[in-house]
Amino acid sequence: MTSPVGITSFGAYVPRLRLARENIAKAHAWAMPNLRGLGKGERSMCNWDEDSITMAVEAARDCLTERDRAAVDGIYFASTTLPFLDRQNAGVIGAAVNLEAGLSSLDIAGSQRAGTSALITALKATGDGESLVVASDARKAKPASTDEMHFGHGAAALGVGSEGVIAKCLGAHTVTVDFVDHYRGEGEDFDYGWEERWIREEGYLKIVPQAVKGLMDKVGGSGDDITHFVMPCTMRGIPQRVAKMFGIADDAVVDNMAATVGDTGAAHALLMLVSALENAKAGDKILVVNFGQGADVILLEATEALAGLPKRAGAAGAVAQGRTETDYMKFASFQNNVKLDFGMRAETDNKTALSMEYRKKDMVTGFVGGRCTKCGTVQYPRSRYCVNPNCQAFDSQEPHPFADQPATLMSFTADWLSYNPSPPFFYGQVNFDDGGRVLMGFTDTDAGQLQVGTPLKMMFRIKDYDELRGYRRYFWKAAPDLNAEKET
Amino acid sequence: MARGIRDKVAIVGMGCSKFGERWESTAEDLMVEAFNEALEDAGIEKNQIEAAWFGTAFDKVHVGASALPLATTLRLSNIPITRVENMCATGTEALRGATYAVASGACDIAMALGVEKLKDTGYGGLPAGSRGTMTDLWVPNGSAPGNFAQLATAYSAKHGVDAKDLKEAIGHVSWKSHQNGAKNEKAHLRKPVPMETILNAPMIAEPLGLFDCCGVSDGSACAIVTTPEIAATLGKHDIISIKALQLCLSDGSESGFSNWDGSHFATTRVAAKKAYEEAGVENPRDEISMIEVHDCFSVTELVTMEDLYISAEGEAVKDVMDGFYDADGQVPCQIDGGLKCFGHPIGASGLRMVYEMYQQLQGKAGERQLADPKLGLTHNLGGAPHSNVSSVSIIGRLN
């Protein structure tokens, strides 16, 4: 028997902006005063330049910390908010993290279960290689709905393989039931949901137990073996009630991050699983249950290798890097729920030459520049003649990745004239520690955070939207590296 | 070594439209206004012009592509006309084409005309749009003020200048130009502005406030050039000649290599050195009587004082605050108001700078006339500090 397949690595990402729920409640108090009852804690929200792909890329990068990317031969991307209905979204993520050619890829969508279904699919399909399972969701919610309160945006990523397993898979089970607790129809921005009491009684408390029992019947064992019980659910007390049905201890129920992040949809079970892994020790058993037109159930057991996993942000790091946002109108504008008048500069045609984008894909999507083999100068973009005025060698450059290089700020401005959905637009010259200088836009930057010499990190973001043609183009942006500042 | 063009070409006629928000005028109206003045000043017939260079940068928002708009508007019949575009240095490029044509002997009389009609876009500032299929994919879609504002952070860091002191110095740059522009009837902005207003204006791109940015204007300027010999046969006395015309472009090393600190214009330094050599200027601080620089933003003007080797490195703030560049200073800068107040119709600006030198050298500058200027320098820049087209020209009396 070959070594057991399981989880080999994990990563997570939660947008930096955290909308204080009391500000959502205040904005709607004139019409929906009862929302006040939900106005506690914070929910994560995408910056204007984030979507499920950009969050997935960040989670994937975290997951790939100190890993051999060449070993990854498959990528599964789960989301109910895929930016493209017909364009392999997983392929964009693969290109952004520079995974080798020969990668298999699959988008998995259509249910809140998508994240766990992607994990089960990968666990079953992974052979000798390693797969990357990424789940990410950026669901919109109708203003003043309870969804707007409950939802958050975020992503999680897991490595799946049989080498260096940190949590082996003991079994998985799925039941499929066309139970329409909510749905989002074609072309619709928002979910339409049925009565919560019905979902609780007929859904969570009947379908989930049926699925858990199905797994228990398969693998044996009992509930009191379970040390971590992962079950996303925004209804209070439900995971505890399910746990109790199977004899799982109350304190095994993993926190659902409602107070800090909110419900990240198709990503949430995996995000909670990452959190569980961060707190697990060898031998711990983790039961993951995920509800949505049926339920997925996965049982995992942490191994000795878990403790040796190199340090990364993970769920704890992602949650910790939040910045409270109190401006509901900013959120409404970022979500496109309100159209601000940004003036005629916002009318600029952002048509992308797809043939050019393909030609320069590694440079643009992967942020790969060049390094001159004659003089060693690192440069971006890669060019036919070396940029060093004392060299200018021809066709001398080999690919050189920029995305994970530390960098510092050389010069910058806060521009109130250019169109930017989150003014002012910060941009400036960035010097990379290993060489190379790039004029870059900034993201996740507040007034007063930048000065000459500020340490920077690179993030994969939306550069421009082409509203006329329904396209969006991605590139890398710089952001203050607050962790680097702490270290120095 | 090439001998250069010093004193090979004379300017015999110039014209300049009123700059500003010319709501009543088309680009064609502005071209006619500059051209008619230049033709009358030259005292020649239109059919004596043998070749022309036409400068426009944002042709898509006014006349459209090619040199045909010049040929058809002025009814220049069947002569060679070239359209040039080199960002905000376009006006100087037009002059360079005409000057080189005369210097080479290819023609006796040539004309340069630049025009820009920017106030048909519906919004302030320069038109925004695609900057090329690859550039659009990675370069941040910033603005001109945003790119130039970065000079300030880099300059402060390099020279240890407090941000507040720098803000005051660039404020003085704009204050001085407003004082000068008030005396120029062709200028776009003709009101002196108190320092306090300048320093407290709304922020455009930090640290540049509204008054640190030049106006966006409609306008046109025109020059007719010939050889000094032909100028004399046309009855010209006190002939004004071109002493130097230098152009220098970035090769990408400022933006992509680490040998530039962001606080100055590497290109301007090269162009200035070459221009001084071509004109035979050894000590610019003492020999240059007046300068018109590309003050698209106040901070551009400030650092350019060092790039032209008139202020020593790190000393521009002091010179500016000492009034060295004021109208009554040793080297008056922007005596016509500059881009800041005369205005900045892109394709015309390089020629407008020469127009002021030409007036001053002939003693025709009216209320703002300087006492006996000998050599004037113009500096016309296109692009951004990290990647640009920089030109330096020197104009003087022939003898």
Image (cartoon, rainbow, N blue to C red):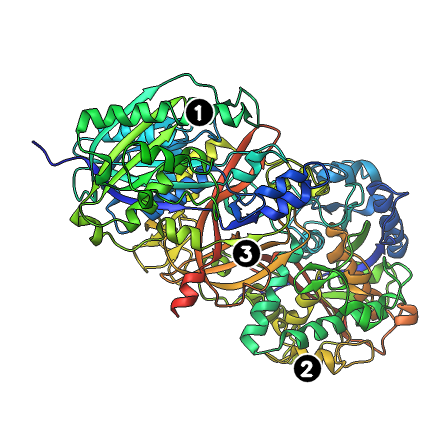
Location of the C terminus of chain B by quadrant is: bottom right
Give the tally of numbered discs: 3
* SS class, disc 1: helix
- Mark 3 belongs to which subunit? A
Pointer 3: what residue? Answer: A445
Give the CA separation, mark 2 to mark 1.
78 Å
- In this view, the residue in front, A368 or A10, is A10
Estimate how packed mark 1 is, as few (under 14), some (14 to 19) or many (20 or more) residues with alpha carbons within 10 Å. few
Chain where mark 1 sits: A
Indicate which label's residue lies in the foreground, 2 or 1: 1
Residue B166 placement (x, y as % from top left): 66, 74
Residue B273: image quadrant is bottom right
Q: Which is more foreground, mark 3 or mark 2?
A: 3
Picture layout, residue B255 above or below residue A384? below
Q: Are marks 2 and 1 in contact (CB under 8 Å)?
A: no
Which amino acid lies under the numbered mark 2 shown in the image of this protein?
A: Lys
Is residue A420 something that shows in the picture?
no
Q: Please give the residue where the numbered disc 2 appears in the rendered image.
A: B318
- In the visual, does A19 lie left or right of B169? left
Q: Are marks 3 and 2 in contact (CB under 8 Å)?
A: no
Which label is found at residue B196? none
Amino acid type of the residue that numbered disc 3 sits on in the rendered structure: Thr
Give left or right: position of A16 versus A372.
right
Residue for badge 1: A201
> Residue B325: x, y in percent?
75, 76
Residue sitting nearer the eye, A219 or A64 = A219
**Disc 3 versus disc 1: distance between alpha carbons?**
45 Å
Q: Nearer the viewer, mark 3 or mark 1?
A: 1
